Image (tube, rainbow, N blue to C red):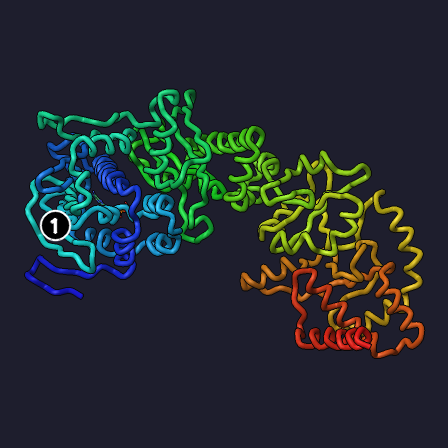
Amino acid sequence: MAENQSDSSQRLGFQTEAKQLLQLMIHSLYSHKEVFLRELVSNASDALDKLRFESLTNSAILGDDTELCVRVKVNETAKTITIADNGIGMTREEVIENIGTIARSGSRAFVESLTGDQKLDSNLIGQFGVGFYSAFMVASKVKLVTKRAGEGRTAVVWESDGQSDYAIAETDKETRGTEVTVYLKDDETSYAEPYNVRSIIKKFSDFIAFPIYFPNEKGHDEVINQTKPLWKRPPLDITSEQYEEFFKQLGGFDKPATTIHSKAEGILEYSFVLFIPSKAPFDLFLPERTHGIKLYVKRVFIMDHCKELFPEYLRFVKGVVDSEDLPLNVSREMLQHNPVIEKMKKTLVAKVLGKLSDMAASEPAGFAAFWDQFGPVLKEGVHSDYENKDKLVELLRFQSTLSDTKDDLVSLKQYVGRMREGQKHIYYISGESREIVEKSPHLEVFRDKSIEVLYFLDPIDEWLVNDLYNYDGKQLRSVAKGDLDLGDLGADDEKQKDKVESTYKKLAERIKNILSDTVKDVRVTVRLKDSPCCLVSDEHDLGPFMEKMMKAMGQDVPESKPILEINGFHPIVENLQAVYDKDPKSPLLDEWVKLLYDQALITGGGLPKDVTGYAKRVNELLLKASKEAAA
Ligand code: ADP
């Protein structure tokens, strides 16, 4: 891979994923190419933030070059644009690590999540932290010269056409920081036109806290951005476009669903801008996921991904929190169990939950869209955030037997509000998808009696039941577990059941014998209207959906046997009884009962253990029926 030219100069190949990414930048992303400027300016600003942070403990690092800034220049003749900063800079190793390899998980995920939609895809660039490479959308060559801040470091020059390798060598550079020169492709020369570049940079950088210089008509550098950080400005002065830009600079994509911008003044003083994104990030549930808050102290950047200010279940909130009370030299360790942080956290969480609850009340469609993306992660809070549990429970939304579409959601409050008179419990059914649960035989009696049933379709919903247990004094009951208890609404059915129960007592025993390996019990039910039978779990068993999930997670699950419930008013069951009456030992009963059991498994979202045996039995019946029909 390496081909040494001299001691200090080398050609190195890009790592595979970097190469893939570059190919994409060069060949696939055509629209919104101007975002490369946002990415480079934002890298410069990050480098300045890092330097300022380091200078807190090492003031000598600044030397006499104390005005931290970005300088952008264009050369219309040479068709280049240069973005320079006097920030932290990079050592040779850092250049190779940061620019040559992009070993971060984000790059592969980026490649995988490309949609083919130009607009969406270019928005992804910022989110996946692959910003530097976006320069290759417009560049035939990129040159980076950098010098790490600190005494006597050698400067490094890195150069590449973005194809398969890059050159790296030592060079001379007097000042610290990084200078990126983009050599524009022939058809991208508009990025060397001063007027055009100035207006793009203005658009992207009004919230960058460092001055950005650009030459005016007379060739004198002048500051073109507003350097007062966005979060320190009055909300009324900020347009929604500016908020959107800021959100993108923080790595958000698309538009934020909602923005919270405020400041606290009192015992503690802090300003914050928080965004609730409209789309979940790709890593929301991955182990390497991060929080989206940047912490500042007195306008000095302290750290990215500050996880001390929000609980895990709000990790998707993006934004900036700027405290006046924390010491500038605050370290990650100091943030844990820090009373200032704890107080801020409490308020910030309340703000976010309050905003979500407003959204739920005033724009249900917007909230449904939010719920679609972040519902599962918010549910984690019901388990983990005892203090805010009640608020979170009010935010929960479910599909139900009464929703026409998947966006038609119901809250527990609404559910209780429209419960039928005499209904005591809140009913739910769990399963993998709406398609599976809505056809379940367990719902037959509920449809018949117009009792609403919530659909629990998220794996986490089963755990939710344990944390929730009841709402507004009403228990949450699975429609597929334990004895059916419809309270007053089931009184008539219960009477009828009592009548048939004795009729089927012997048959039920015979069935139990046939299925002794697979079921715990056989009993007559009023759950069913159209189906002959179904399987239910015992009150305290996990249930088939939960068992399946836990097995998928590699956990040992105790085998629990279901209960087979038979519908005493179904003609098939009546006929079985007639066959039994003629000959209790009839082998036909064995075959049919096994068939019915397998069917009950299937309608419950499972699969028969012996699929071939099942098919054989169905075929035998078909053969008989078709023979009769043909005769
Ligand atoms: P991201 O900025 O999202 O991490 P980039 O691909 O834009 O991704 O940059 C990769 C890394 O290169 C940065 O994280 C940073 O460490 C380094 N880098 C890029 N530009 C600069 C710069 N101007 N000064 C110092 N380091 C930089």
Q: In the depicted view, which residue is nearer to us: 540 or 74?
A: 74
Dot 1: element: strand
Q: Quadrant of the C terminus?
A: bottom right
Identify the residue position indicated by label 1 in the image.
156
Relative to 517, say whether 296 is above or below.
above
Q: Is residue 57 visible?
A: no
Q: Which quadrant holds residue 562?
A: bottom right
* 313 relative position to 107: left or right: right
Image coordinates for residue 197, horizontal then vertical, percent: 20, 34
Q: Which amino acid type is shown beneath numbered disc 1?
A: Val
Instruction: Kindly identify the residue that appears in the image at 79 percent across and 50 percent down.
Output: 445
Where is residue 174 drawn, in percent x and y? 7, 41
Question: Going 45% across and 45% down the picture, which residue do you hit?
Answer: 280
Horizontal arrangement in the rendering, residue 531 relative to residue 24 (left or right): right
Q: Position of residue 104 (x, y in %)?
A: 32, 54
| Other-residue count near label 1 (Cα within 10 Å), few / some / many at <14 / 14–19 / ≥20 | many
Determine whether 576 is above or below 229 in the image: below
Q: Nearer the viewer, residue 567 or 4?
A: 567
The image quadrant of residue 86 is top left
Residue 136: % across, % down: 22, 49
Image quadrant assignment for residue 187: top left
- Residue at horizontal 10 percent and vertical 54 percent from the top: 169
